[in-house]
Image (cartoon, rainbow, N blue to C red):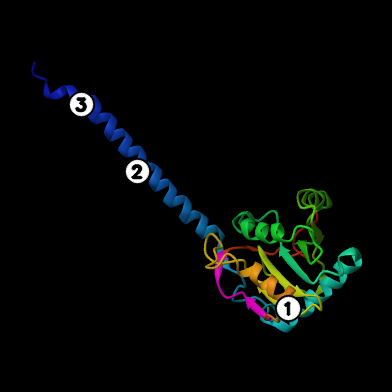
Amino acid sequence: MSVSPGTDIPGRKKTLLVSVLIFVWLAGSLFGLWWFQQQSLRPFVEADAPAESRSPDIVEQGLAALLKRVSAEYPESSDALVTVVHLWNPDCLCNNVSARHTRAIIEQWPEGDEVRFVILAPETLPENRLAEARKLNPNALVMRASANDKLPLTASPGLAVLSQNASLAYFGAYGFGALCSLSDEALFTNMIERLLAGESYGPFLNIAGSGCFCAWPDPTQLPVE
């Protein structure tokens, strides 16, 4: 029995429809990626940022002042050999892309005896959101930044790593690019291991690059909720 040439038209229409849908999905994905990059990609330190944000000495002084506050508020943590400070702004979507690096550090030293983990939030963050962060991160010390620290904060997410005597080992981004990726996922854990072993490291400011960052909130411009 012969088949009419027109009998496969519904199949052709279905194939065409699927092809169009795939094309629209790909176009939408590419547009979404482009929009994300346009909205979120920025330098960790902008070109017009104050010069002190690029000075290892000034950054170290600000972090040393922060560690004094940490030890005063949490005296039980003052014996830790290494302090890791996570620059955290919950209103920044970019925190999600650095979460795996943060988890890798916390999970390797969960007790906090040798390594204390500080989550530093903007001054403008209300207390109820700090309380939520403490519940979600029971092994971390959650506190607000203070102008008295004189720490030149420009962006988040980011981190600082310091030895027991408040010597700066690392300050800057977790990584660069749209996904804040690293060529070596063990960079920070290896760095901490070296400090725990009594070796010196840094100071290293890793701020010269663009990635998924949000500007650190200016407390003089944003009202406290």
Q: If the image is split into quadrants, where does the N terminus sit? A: top left
The label shown at residue 73 is: none
Which segment did they paint magenta?
203-211
User: Is 91 rendered above or below residue 221?
Assistant: above
Give the CA separation, mark 2 to mark 1: 50 Å
Whether residue 153 is visible, yes or no, is no
Q: Residue 4 at x, y = what percent?
A: 11, 20
| Quadrant of res 66 | bottom right
Determine the residue positioned at 67% across, 57% down: 103
Q: Which residue is mark 1?
A: 168
Which three-letter amino acid code belongs to the residue tagged 1? Leu
Whichever of labels 3 and 2 marks the residue nearer the N terminus, that label is 3
Amino acid at the residue labelled 2: Phe
Question: Disc 3 versus disc 2: distance between alpha carbons?
Answer: 21 Å
Packing grade of label 3 (10 A; few <14, some 14-19, many >=20) is few
User: Which label belongs to residue 23?
Assistant: 2
SS assignment at label 1 = strand
Of labels 2 and 1, the one closer to you: 1
The reply to whether dot 3 and dot 2 touch (C-beta < 8 Å) is no
Q: Which mark is residue 9?
A: 3
